[in-house]
Amino acid sequence: MSLEAPPSGWIHKKIARDEKGWIIAATVVCIAMFFWMILWHVYGKQNPSSVTYYTTPEEFTTLTNSFIEQNQIGEDNGIPVVMPKPESDVFLLAQMWRWSSVIVLKKDEWYKFHISSKDVMHGFSVQPINMNFMVFPNYDYVLDFKPNKTGEYMVVCNEFCGIGHHLMIGKIVVIEDESELANYGY
Amino acid sequence: MSEENQSTTFLESLLNNMWLLLILGVGVYFVSYIFWGWAEIILIKGIPAEIKDLFTK
């Protein structure tokens, strides 16, 4: 039976040359991929900031409301439209079944997104660029964000969050200067 | 020295025991990932005061 141990002393047997070659090749590939994983984390520019803060839905709601008050420039179907300054903190609250605001950003500028949920787990999925992050209640997930193309991006929830999940669509608008705001009705 | 006369080493007896290998292979990762996860959760801090002050004062 194949599951039985080979005869005693097998460990002292010499390994055939071709088998030794495959063992060395597999080990080298494993080690190279391990270090590539670390290098890619630093140089790949595809990773989140790895910064998370503990919060509560009440605290995050207060911060988000205050952020909206400070940066609101209009409304889109009853949802506040905000235009934060470049290099500033942006608060986005997910809740069944809406995102707290429509966000207008400037192209090629850095923003620090803080994303959290008021109730259940949601998904922050920016389309059509397909950038996906999970959004949990009680945790403020920080993302360093620099849009590099102008246009209108949809933020869809990609974690099933209840009966209105499919209606939970937000918006991020990326512009080069304020004169473009009129194109989006703001 | 012929192969029959050689004593069974610790490594050989370990590698011969597939159930022990299975338990180690699953158990080591199970324990270390649980520990890693708890450590990450415990080490999460609150939102820094300098960020909160920007929006609450």
Image (cartoon, rainbow, N blue to C red):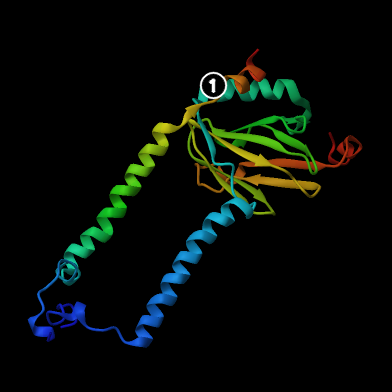
The quadrant in which the C terminus of chain B is found is top right
Considering every residue shown, the one lying at the far left of the view is B5
Foreground residue, A154 or A2?
A: A2
In the picture of the structure, the residue carrying the numbered disc 1 is A59
Considering every residue shown, the one lying at the far right of the view is A179
Dot 1, crowdedness within 10 Å: few (<14), some or many (≥20)?
A: few
A18 to A178, vertically: above or below = below
Taking the image as drawn, is residue A94 in sight? no
Q: Residue at x 50, y 46 (%)?
A: A160
Q: Residue at x 54, y 25 (%)?
A: B47
Q: Position of residue A30 (x, y in %)?
A: 44, 67
Foreground residue, A65 or A32?
A: A32
Q: Position of residue A151 (x, y in %)?
A: 80, 47
Q: Position of residue A18 (x, y in %)?
A: 38, 87
Q: Residue at x 54, y 61 (%)?
A: A36
Q: Is residue A105 left or right of residue A161?
A: right
Q: Which three-letter amino acid code belongs to the residue tagged 1?
A: Glu
A127 to A97, vertically: above or below = below
A118 to A157, vertically: above or below = above
The quadrant in which the N terminus of chain B is found is bottom left
**Chain containing the residue with disc 1:** A
Local secondary structure at mark 1 = helix
Q: Is residue A2 left or right of residue A67?
A: left
User: Looking at the rendering, which quadrant does residue B16 occupy?
Assistant: bottom left
Q: Position of residue A120 (x, y in %)?
A: 48, 36
A65 to A81, vertically: above or below = above
Considering every residue shown, the one lying at the far top of the view is B57
User: Looking at the rendering, which quadrant does residue A63 occupy?
Assistant: top right
